Amino acid sequence: MRKNIGIKIDTADFLPKRKNIKKSKKIAFCALFSALSVVLLYVGAIIEVMDISMACIASMLCIVALTEIGGAYPWLVYGVTGAISLLILPQKFGAIIYIGLAGYYPMVKFLIESHQNRLIGWILKILLFNVSMGIIVWASLFLFTTANMTKAYIISLFALGNFTFVIYDIALSLLVKLYFLKYRKLLRIDKILK
């Protein structure tokens, strides 16, 4: 296993070998997880201080879809959740965060960590974050005309965002490990999908 800042975790090591799963079960599973993700994002839109947190929690459902089904299905969960949340959420910022970074990042994280060494992986992940953050800031300025961001605010936003992103990446790795070691047995999703 590779080391992630002193923590011995490589999320790619936790991908199980998938057995034959019926396509109808895969689609039903994705629909269920998309619905749960939209509910989480809706809660974040209602309680506005939780919009970023709920986007990150909703991204965990993409991880479960990735580990239990794989293929294009986690991307299906991401796409459906993003489209529906943009249509129905009363406040769109949580949907923008989900679409702009949180929703697809777990799948990209698995790809990067399984194909790159640790240093190159971190460089790619931080570069991806900064590009995504730039798009999110631009979209926020475009969609929310009341947003008044100065240059100093944007610089501090990126500095704090990079620090928070590193913590989020490490926490995501720990949550994947926790899912496999504890919650996977409790939820029995692999048994349902048989």
Image (tube, helix red, strand yellow):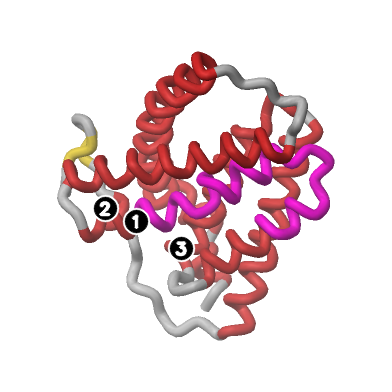
Marks 1 and 3 close (CB-CB < 8 Å): yes
Q: Residue at x 51, y 63 (%)?
A: 65
Q: Nearer the viewer, residue 168 or 162?
A: 162
Q: Residue at x 74, y 52 (%)?
A: 86
Q: Position of residue 28 (x, y in %)?
A: 67, 73
Q: Amino acid at mark 2?
A: Glu
Graded by Cα atoms within 10 Å as few (under 14), some (14 to 19) or many (20 or more), the crowding at tag 2 reads some
Label 1: element kind = helix
Which residues fall within the magenta stretch?
Answer: 82-110
Q: Of the residues tagged 1 and 3, which is closer to the observer? A: 1
Q: Position of residue 189 (x, y in %)?
A: 54, 64
Q: Residue at x 41, y 21 (%)?
A: 159
* Marks 2/3: CA–CA distance: 14 Å
Q: Amino acid at mark 1?
A: Phe
Residue annotated with mark 1: 110
Is residue 178 at all visible to an observer of this figure?
no
31 inside magenta stretch: no
Residue annotated with mark 3: 66
Marks 1 and 2 close (CB-CB < 8 Å): yes
Q: Of the residues tagged 2 and 3, which is closer to the observer? A: 2
